Image (cartoon, grey):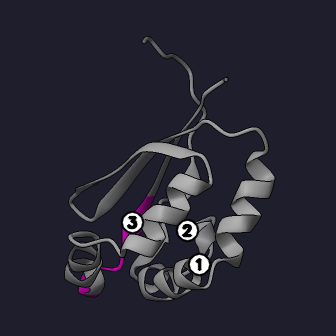
Amino acid sequence: MSVRRFGMACRLVPELREEYLRLHSAVWPGVAQTITECGIRNFSIFERDGVLFGYYEYVGDDYEADQRRMADDPVTREWWARTDPCQLPFVDEGDAGSRAAWQEFTEVWHQD
């Protein structure tokens, strides 16, 4: 099984920072279950000064299909409806309050 690693970043809407952190202090079990069922492991989100950095590893066989499966999950869609408005693009390229706010990084080096 191969592992794909993802790094991404976005910013928090300043007045919604506490709401975002509150939601992530107790991620809904259905969201966590869907993330796992869709092949995502070792998922972390870090915050500093209103900037979010996310990292995860994908261990499945069809990333695009698993991403569609996640997007079709009603619990995950409700979660995103609450978290997306808290997010802004890291740089002014994505749409505020949407999945596009998270912008992916290119992996340049890795060591196990």
Disc number lying in front (3 or 1): 1
Give SS at disc 2: helix
As drawn, the label of residue 98 is: 1
Tags 1 and 2 touching, CB below 8 Å: yes
Q: Specify the amino acid type for callout 1.
A: Ser
Q: Mark 2 vs mark 3: which is more N-terminal?
A: 3
Q: Which residues are magenta?
A: 10-15
- Taking the magenta stretch, the answer to whether it contains residue 12 is yes
Give the spatial CA distance, label 1 vs label 2. Answer: 6 Å
Q: Position of residue 80 (x, y in %)?
A: 51, 80
Q: Mark 2 sits on what residue?
A: 101
Residue 12 relative to residue 90: left or right: left
The quadrant of the picture occupied by the C terminus is: top left
Give SS at disc 1: loop
Give the spatial CA distance, label 3 vs label 1. Answer: 12 Å
Residue 25 higher or lower than 19, as above or below: above
Q: Mark 3 sits on what residue?
A: 11
Q: Nearer the viewer, residue 40 or 17?
A: 40
Residue drawn at point x = 20 percent, y = 70 percent: 25
Q: Specify the amino acid type for callout 3.
A: Arg
Tags 2 and 3 touching, CB below 8 Å: yes
